[in-house]
Image: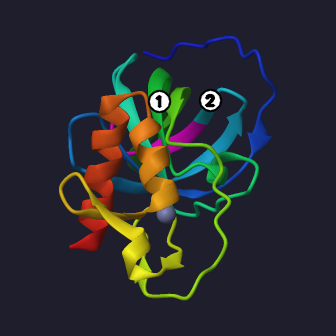
Amino acid sequence: MTQIIPRKNPRTDYRAPIHHALLNTQQFRPTLTYDYSLDGMCYVTDQPLDIESEVCIVMDNYLPGKEGLEGYRSYLARTRWIKRLSINGADQYAAGAQIVARSHEVLATEAQLPRRRCDLCDTWQPAHRIEAVGQGVELCRLCTLRFNKIPSVRVRQCLERYLLGNVI
Ligand SMILES: [Zn+2]
């Protein structure tokens, strides 16, 4: 089942909290990354993911303006390899994922008088600058623009589901 794919880019060791879910499911599971490169990342999962399966990965430590994985809110990634790990007798897996799409570019919003919080970038904005998108996710104008520019409908839906799950 293990498949080694030669890497084009050097990897950076990096433990970051993430949530991940198979595309078209709503079961986001918390886990950690191992490392990342320019076009991929490795993370721990308790699911024996199929090769080529598509996974939505959301950064818990999303930080607009930061370089690295946390500079983006979420990723659509394709599973390229999976390796079984045995940790304390429980089966876990290391998954190698190729990044297919990023949620949006780095944000650069400035703080305004706080009224309501944007579900995506977590900044507080005057209420009139917050808009409801899709099924009731509330976004600032910049995030609304970014959100609507995400080319992949699947990434938009994935992100929307995740944000709604956090709101309720
Ligand atoms: Zn925002």
27 to the left or right of 108: left
Would you name the residue on which mark 2 appears?
A: 40
Going from the N terminus, do you reach mark 2 or mark 1 first? 2
101 to the left or right of 69: left
Q: Is 53 situated above or below 143?
A: above
Q: How crowded is mark 1: few (under 14 residues within 10 Å), some or many (20 or more)?
A: many
Q: Is 92 situated above or below 38?
A: below
Determine the residue positioned at 76% across, 15% down.
8
Q: Is 71 situated above or below 42?
A: below
Would you name the residue on which mark 1 appears?
A: 77
Determine the residue positioned at 52% across, 56% down.
142
Determine the residue positioned at 24% across, 50% down.
27
Amino acid type at image mark 1: Ala
Q: Which stretch appears magenta?
A: 42-48
Q: Is 103 situated above or below 17?
A: above
Q: Residues within 10 Å of mark 2 (few under 14, many from 20)?
A: many
Is residue 46 part of the magenta span, yes or no?
yes
Q: 112 or 51, which is in the foreground?
A: 112
Image location of residue 41, percent across then percent down: 61, 35
Q: 132 or 19, which is in the foreground?
A: 132
Image location of residue 66, percent across then percent down: 74, 56
Image location of residue 166, percent across then percent down: 30, 68
Label 2 residue SS: strand
Determine the residue positioned at 21% across, 35% down.
24
Task: Mark 2 and mark 1 in contact? Answer it, CB < 8 Å.
Answer: yes
Q: 10 or 143, which is in the foreground?
A: 143
10 to the left or right of 162: right
